[in-house]
Amino acid sequence: MDISKRQNQALDMLLREDGEMTLAQIAARLSVSTRTIHRELSTVAPALRQRFQLELASRSGHGLRIVGDPQRIQACLAELESSSRNELPPEERRRLLAAMLLDAPDVIKLFALTADLVATTPMVRADLDLLHPWFALHGLNLVLKRGLGVLLEGSESNRRQALCALIMEQFGEAGLLGLIRGEQAPRNGHGQTADFLCRLVQLARFGGAEAELSGLPRGCLPQLAPRDYLGLVVHLAVASARSTLNRLLDPPSNNLENFGNKAPAPAAVALGGFLKAQNPAIDGAAEAIALDRYLRGAKPASIGGDLLDATSIGNLAEVQELIAACGREGGFAFGDDRILRDGIAAH
């Protein structure tokens, strides 16, 4: 049945109750008003009758009960229980919905979204309403086309920015470090969104992006705050995945128009060349500009990029000793992991 979580819970109560329950009793258990319960049950009663031949009966001054064949009551309970197990938490569902829309090059049918998300049509419509301003912040427009489905309008550049923001939010810094090391995606709760995002970008691309950044000539890459460095890894991994699928950036009319006639930073140019080597159809200048835009907005590191430089921070010796001591206790050379090393130093 295409019903909400609250409708599921109300029906479950009635189906398991031997006698009758009042609207007030159901409302108190679900922490909502009696009017809400009345509306929810009135909406679901036709589906209950059509699918299971069960009737929602009421007696004035007594309450409600579901009447019908005991076997059909058990079948309805089993379906409600199965639906409850598969239902995604609202936040997880919205993240997955956002990822699906960002990946889709064309219209997605609403019924396909409801099936993939294990959600009702009203739930998906409500999620779309909530996501609309989030997409707008990234320069994208969410359009619901009557009779056709849902379409996300906007440039490839803005899609990538939104996808990067979603990945950063989904995994966090600790999770991203694991992805870079090639570890299985962290599974919080159901884990569908994490799995979906890893399929979109492919796990190996995170490690490949970090390796490319590590291989840049010394001094080529500006010293970045740890989170912004991770963000750059994500941007490069996403650009690599999207461009391999021929999801290409639009060529800029003037490669210098957004930068006060300043050429992109050497690191951005080098990384643009890295992407073009993967797909010759890529506009390397457009990719370099996109990466340079990120670098210009990133925060500088609060410490030097190389902890062996004694002039980087005043308490260098203490930081190095702390990291070394942690490594001895844990049996792991933390200093060899640049992202983790710099993150500990920054903290």
Image (cartoon, rainbow, N blue to C red):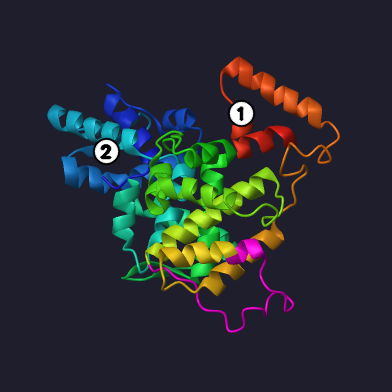
Rounded to the nearest whole Å, what is the CA distance between mark 2 and mark 1?
64 Å
Q: Identify residue type, mark 1.
A: Phe
Q: Residue at x 21, y 34 (%)?
A: 76
Residue 147 image offset from top left, x and y in percent: 31, 70
Q: In screen coordinates, is 15 left or right of 285?
A: left
Q: In screen coordinates, is 264 left or right of 84?
A: right
| Mark 2 or 1: the one toward you | 1
Q: Name the residue nearer the viewer: 97 or 124.
A: 97
Q: Circle 2 sits on which residue?
A: 56
Please give the range of residues in magenta. 246-269
Q: Residues within 10 Å of mark 1 (few under 14, many from 20)?
A: some
Q: Identify residue type, mark 2.
A: Leu
Q: Secondary structure at mark 1?
A: helix
Q: Residue at x 67, y 43 (%)?
A: 226
Is disc 2 in contact with disc 1, using a CB cutoff of under 8 Å?
Answer: no
Residue 79's label in the rendered image is none
